[in-house]
Amino acid sequence: MAKKVDVNAKWDACLDLTLRRFVYSSLAGAFGGLLFFRSPVTRWASIAFATGVGVGSAYTECSHIFDGSPTQSSPKDGED
């Protein structure tokens, strides 16, 4: 039963992380678009890019939460 609670906590953490990074990165992209660009198309593009960065970073963090951090492999023979 404790393992199921652990999975639920992981899902809660990932959903919270994804939602926060989605909102914060979208707001940062909107602010940057308003500050740096005049055309509405480039403003929307900056919002889309920033949102993609936020969701991508959340995806990476969630994969570390579920799978654990990857172990460092030992160097192969002959490599320094």
Image: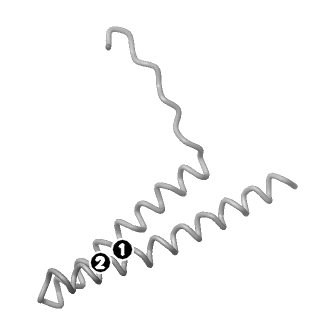
Rendering coords of residue 5 (x, y %): 79, 59
At a point 29% along the width and 77% down the height, the residue shown is 29
Based on the displayed image, in which of its 4 quarters is residue 41 positioned? Answer: bottom left
* Three-letter code, disc 2: Gly
At a point 16% along the width and 82% down the height, the residue shown is 42
Q: Are marks 1 and 2 in contact (CB under 8 Å)?
A: yes
Q: Residue furthest right?
A: 1
**Label 2: which secondary element:** helix
> Is 50 placed left or right of 19 in the picture?
left
At a point 80% along the width and 52% down the height, the residue shown is 3
Per the rendering, the mark at residue 20 is none
Pick the quarter of the image with the N terminus. Answer: bottom right
> Is 6 placed left or right of 39 in the picture?
right
Per the rendering, the mark at residue 51 is 1
Mark 2 or mark 1, which is nearer the start of the sequence? Answer: 2
Q: CA distance from mark 1 to mark 2?
A: 7 Å
Rendering coords of residue 27 (x, y %): 36, 81
Q: Residue furthest top?
A: 78
Q: Residue furthest left?
A: 38
**Label 1: which secondary element:** helix
> Is 43 placed left or right of 21 in the picture?
left
Which residue carries the number 2 mark?
A: 29
Based on the displayed image, in which of its 4 quarters is residue 25 positioned? Answer: bottom left
* Three-letter code, disc 1: Thr
Query: Viewer-nearest of labels 1 and 2?
Result: 2
Pick the quarter of the image with the C terminus. Answer: top left
Give the answer, above or below, for where 75 lies relative to 78.
Answer: below
Q: Looking at the image, which is closer to me, 55 or 34?
A: 34
